Image (cartoon, helix red, strand yellow):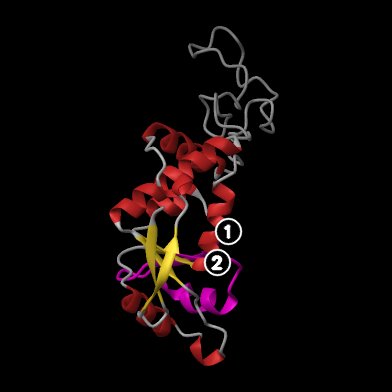
Amino acid sequence: MPTLKTKKQTGAAGADFELSPAVFEADQNAVLVREVYTAWMTNQRQGTHSTKTRAHVRGGGKKPWKQKHTGRARQGSTRAPQWRGGAIIFGPLPRDYHEKVNKKKRSAAFRAVLSSKLTAGEIIVVDALDFQKKSDVKTKNVVEMLEKVGAKGKTLIVVKERNEGLSRAAGNLAGSAQTPTRVTNVDAISIYDLLVAQTLLITGDALTALQERLAK
């Protein structure tokens, strides 16, 4: 059974954390990961784009000029697509882009990405993250914590339940050039979050919950 040495918020070494072989020794399936990732990206589209066809454009009921003997091309309406202010032909209309991915596929993709991150040494497990006191809810405290535990690059912090203090303290780091950081809970984590994160910083209870969900 694979294990991972945990760390405390101060950076001190903690106990060994037992990892589930079913989750962290999964087969690498790049095609499946790509499929689940593409579906997630597609599902982010709102589909609210809209253009007006001739049926929707107001006006243009009168024929601009008579059909023959003018020397000009025949025209039926000033709301035709070739006219300024006219309709749009074959333009985008509101639609639903939702693409369904079944639970087994999604879980298998998660396991493949997590196994890859473990092999690359991109997972850090901390026993707990305490940002409950008002004096601790500061961005500099989060930056110091990330440095102490060894987080590098774009970091995804995963907790079991929403931590208001931690989310507020790390909020200013979302667009940081040095330590871009995002906080989420284990139920809201997505395949996109895992793929873009260079460091996955997860609490012990959150990792336990994640393993239980993915091992099914």
Q: Quadrant of residue 124?
A: bottom left
User: Could you give the CA–CA distance between mark 1 and mark 2, rounded to whole angstroms?
Assistant: 6 Å
Picture disc at residue 37: none
Q: Quadrant of residue 146?
A: bottom left
**Image position, residue 138 (x, y; %):** 46, 85
Q: Are marks 1 and 2 in contact (CB under 8 Å)?
A: yes
27 left or right of 188 in image:
left
For the image, the number of numbered tags is: 2
Q: Nearer the viewer, residue 181 or 159?
A: 159
Say if residue 32 shows up in the picture.
yes
SS at mark 2? Answer: helix
Q: Nearer the viewer, residue 34 or 117?
A: 117
Residue name at image x 41 percent, y 78 percent: 8
**Image position, residue 47 (x, y; %):** 59, 39
**Above or below 169: residue 109:** above
Residue sitting farthest toward the top: 68
Q: Amino acid at mark 2?
A: Asp
Q: Residues within 10 Å of mark 2 (few under 14, many from 20)?
A: some
**Image position, residue 172 (x, y; %):** 44, 75
Return the residue at label 2.
205
Residue name at image x 38 percent, y 53 percent: 196
Return the residue at label 1.
209
Say if residue 174 shows up in the picture.
no
Q: Nearer the viewer, residue 187 or 23?
A: 23
- Does the magenta run of residues contain 73? no
**Image position, residue 152 (x, y; %):** 30, 67
Q: Which residues are magenta?
A: 157-185
SS at mark 1? Answer: helix
